[in-house]
Image (tube, grey):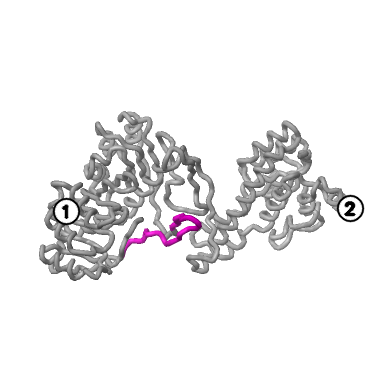
C-alpha cells in the first residue's frame, strides 16, 4: 500500500482546540490548506495562508452556511482512487485537485440540546450535514486519505507527516474506524433527541451513543477485560465524570459499588452515608452531621464494612475524616460531592491504607431525571425506565389498626428509602436512622427476614422493617414481631394481604402499604 504525499488538507471544525498549532505544523510541511467560514477566519488570524473553499469551487457559501463544502470539486478530490486511471483522468478534466487530509469535527449537537430550554430550531440548526459527509467520504477512501475527527489525533498525524511527508496506512485505517464510530455516535445522539421529542420511550431502533472514558484493570474477575464508557450527552452528577483525588486505579467492581452507594445517599435530605459490599448496602444512616451519619453507617455491620465502598451526600469535613480514619478500618473507595482540604489531607496521610484508598469527588448533586436502564441478555438487550423516581407518599395507606407515631413513621420512610437498593428478596431493619440488618438476594422472603434479624442481633427490638415486595404469607410478620420490630412497610398486593394485616393487628404492629414494588435483580 503506497502512502500518498500529503499535499492538501480540507479543514472545517467546530472544536478549534489545538488547531492553530496543528495547521502551522502542516503548513511548515508544505501542506496547502483549504477551509470555510469560521475555521478559515480562525486560521487566518493565526497567521496561516488559507485557500477559501468557495473561491476554489466557484460556488459561494449559502443558506446561512448550510451549503459550504457539499460540492463535487471537494468530494471528487477526497473520493478519487489514486490507483484508478479513470478516476484520475476525470478529476483532471474537471479541474479537481486531490485532498490527502480531511480535518472535521461536527457541530456541537449534544452540547446544544443539553442546554436548558433549548429551542427546536437551535437543535435542528446544530445537526451537521456537510461535516458527516466529509468524514464518511474520507474514511471510505482511507487507502489514500487521512481523516481527523478529534484534536487528540493531531499529534500522531503531524509526527508522521514531519517524518515521511505522508501518513501510514495503519494510521489511516485506525483513524477511519474512529471516524465511523464518531459519526455513528453523532447520529445516535440525534436519533435519541428525536425520540425524546416524540415521547417515544422505546423507538423501533435503539442506538446508545457511548464514548470510551477509561480502560479498567480488569472486570469482575482478573481474567476479564473491562472498560468504562461515558454516555454521550449525559449530564448531571455521575461517577464517570468524577475527579479521582487519590488511590489506585478504579476497578469494574469499585464502579458498580460506588454507583450503588451514590444511588442511596443522593435523594436523602439529611446528611447521609452508605456502605456497600458486593453491591448491597451493609450500612446506611442519616444524622444531624455527616460525621454522625458516617459513624452510624459503619456501625450497622462493622464486620462487613471492612473493605467496603462508601458514599456521602455532603462535602467530607475533618470530623467525618476522623471517623473514617479510625484504627482497624480498611476502605476501598469513598465518593462524595467534595472533600475539604483538611479532610483530604487526613485521608491521604493518616490511615495505613492512605495511598490505596480511592477518593472521588463528583461535584454538587444535580436533580436526577428519569433515565433508561439497560441490561444485556444473550442475543439482545432488556430496556426499562430506571427505578429512580421517588414514591408518592400520598398513595401510601396505613392498613392496620395501630397507627405509627411520628418517630416510627420517619424510621419507616428511611427503611423504605434503603430497601429499594437491596437485591431481591430484600429486607431491611433500621433504627434511629441507621440500617442495622439487611437480608439480600434470598430465594425465600422469610429467609431474608431471618438474615436481617440475625444481623441486627440485640439491636432488633425497637426497629422497623421494610420489604421490597409483598409478603406472601404471615410467617415473616410473626418472626419480626418476636424480634421486637415495631413497624412494617411494604408494597402490599398479595392474595394473603388480609392474613398479613391480621398478623400485624394481632401483634399491635402498624403497617404501611406503599402500592409500589422495588425489585432489584
182 to the left or right of 429: right
Residue in front for this viewpoint, 170 or 73? 170
Query: CB under 8 Å between callouts 1 and 2?
Result: no
Question: The C terminus appears in which quarter of the rendering?
Answer: bottom left
Residue 66 in the image: state x and y as whole percent: 69, 60
**Which class describes the residues within 10 Å of circle 2: few (<14), some (14-19), or many (20+)?**
few
Marker disc for residue 463: 1
Q: Which residues are magenta?
A: 373-391
Which structural element holds mark 2?
helix
Disc nearer the start of the sequence (1/2)? 2
Name the residue: 37% across, 32% down. 356
Based on the picture, tell me whether residue 385 belongs to the magenta stretch: yes
453 to the left or right of 202: left
Residue 396 in the image: state x and y as whole percent: 25, 67
Which residue position holds label 2? 93
Residue in front for this viewpoint, 221 or 370? 221
Residue 414 in sight here: no
Name the residue: 34% across, 29% down. 349
Residue 24 in the image: state x and y as whole percent: 71, 37
Residue in front for this viewpoint, 201 or 366? 201
Amino acid at each position: 500500500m503506497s502512502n500518498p504525499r500529503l499535499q492538501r488538507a480540507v479543514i472545517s471544525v467546530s472544536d478549534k482546540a489545538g488547531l492553530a498549532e496543528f495547521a502551522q505544523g502542516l503548513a511548515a510541511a508544505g501542506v496547502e490548506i483549504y477551509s470555510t467560514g469560521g475555521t478559515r477566519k480562525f486560521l487566518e488570524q493565526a497567521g496561516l495562508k488559507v485557500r477559501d473553499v468557495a473561491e476554489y469551487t466557484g460556488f459561494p457559501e449559502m443558506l446561512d452556511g448550510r451549503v459550504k463544502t457539499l460540492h463535487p470539486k471537494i468530494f471528487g478530490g477526497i473520493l478519487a482512487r489514486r490507483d484508478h486511471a479513470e478516476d484520475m483522468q476525470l478529476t483532471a478534466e474537471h479541474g479537481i485537485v486531490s485532498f490527502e487530509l480531511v480535518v472535521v469535527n461536527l457541530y456541537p449537537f449534544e452540547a446544544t440540546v443539553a442546554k436548558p430550554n433549548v429551542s427546536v430550531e437551535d437543535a435542528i440548526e446544530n445537526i451537521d450535514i456537510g461535516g458527516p459527509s466529509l468524514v464518511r467520504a474520507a474514511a471510505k477512501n482511507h487507502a489514500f486519505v487521512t481523516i481527523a475527527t478529534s484534536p487528540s489525533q493531531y499529534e500522531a498525524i503531524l509526527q508522521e507527516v514531519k517524518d515521511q511527508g505522508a501518513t501510514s496506512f495503519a494510521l489511516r485505517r485506525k483513524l477511519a474506524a474512529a471516524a465511523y464510530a464518531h459519526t455513528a455516535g453523532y447520529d445516535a445522539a440525534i436519533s435519541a433527541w428525536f425520540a425524546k421529542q416524540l415521547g417515544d420511550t422505546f423507538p423501533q431502533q435503539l442506538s446508545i451513543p457511548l464514548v470510551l472514558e477509561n480502560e479498567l484493570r480488569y472486570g469482575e474477575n482478573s481474567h476479564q477485560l473491562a472498560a468504562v464508557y461515558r454516555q454521550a450527552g449525559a449530564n448531571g452528577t455521575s461517577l464517570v465524570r468524577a475527579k479521582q483525588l487519590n488511590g489506585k486505579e478504579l476497578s469494574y467492581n469499585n464502579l458498580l459499588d460506588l454507583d450503588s452507594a451514590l444511588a442511596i445517599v443522593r435523594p436523602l435530605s439529611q446528611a447521609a452515608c452508605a456502605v456497600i459490599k458486593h453491591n448491597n448496602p451493609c450500612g446506611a444512616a442519616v444524622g444531624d452531621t455527616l460525621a454522625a451519619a458516617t459513624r452510624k453507617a459503619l456501625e450497622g455491620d462493622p464486620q462487613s464494612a471492612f473493605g467496603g465502598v462508601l458514599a456521602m451526600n455532603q462535602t467530607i469535613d475533618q470530623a467525618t475524616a476522623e471517623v473514617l480514619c479510625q484504627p482497624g478500618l480498611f476502605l476501598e473507595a469513598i465518593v462524595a460531592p467534595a472533600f475539604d482540604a483538611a479532610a483530604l489531607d487526613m485521608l491521604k496521610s493518616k490511615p495505613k491504607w492512605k495511598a490505596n484508598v480511592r477518593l472521588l469527588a463528583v461535584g454538587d448533586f444535580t436533580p436526577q431525571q428519569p433515565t433508561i436502564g439497560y441490561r444485556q441478555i444473550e442475543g439482545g438487550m432488556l430496556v426499562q425506565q430506571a427505578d429512580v423516581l421517588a414514591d408518592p407518599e400520598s398513595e401510601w395507606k396505613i392498613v392496620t389498626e395501630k397507627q405509627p407515631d411520628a418517630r416510627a413513621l420517619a424510621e419507616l420512610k428511611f427503611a423504605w428509602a434503603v430497601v429499594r437498593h437491596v437485591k431481591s428478596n430484600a429486607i431491611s431493619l433500621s433504627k434511629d436512622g441507621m440500617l442495622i440488618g439487611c437480608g439480600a438476594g434470598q430465594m425465600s422472603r422469610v429467609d431474608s427476614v431471618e438474615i436481617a434479624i440475625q444481623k441486627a442481633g440485640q439491636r432488633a427490638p425497637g426497629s422497623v422493617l421494610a420489604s421490597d415486595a409483598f409478603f406472601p404469607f404471615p410467617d415473616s410478620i410473626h418472626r419480626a414481631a418476636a424480634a421486637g420490630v415495631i413497624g412494617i412497610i411494604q408494597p402490599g398486593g398479595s392474595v394473603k394481604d388480609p392474613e398479613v394485616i391480621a398478623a400485624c393487628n394481632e401483634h399491635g404492629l402498624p403497617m404501611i402499604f406503599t402500592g409500589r414494588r422495588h425489585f432489584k435483580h
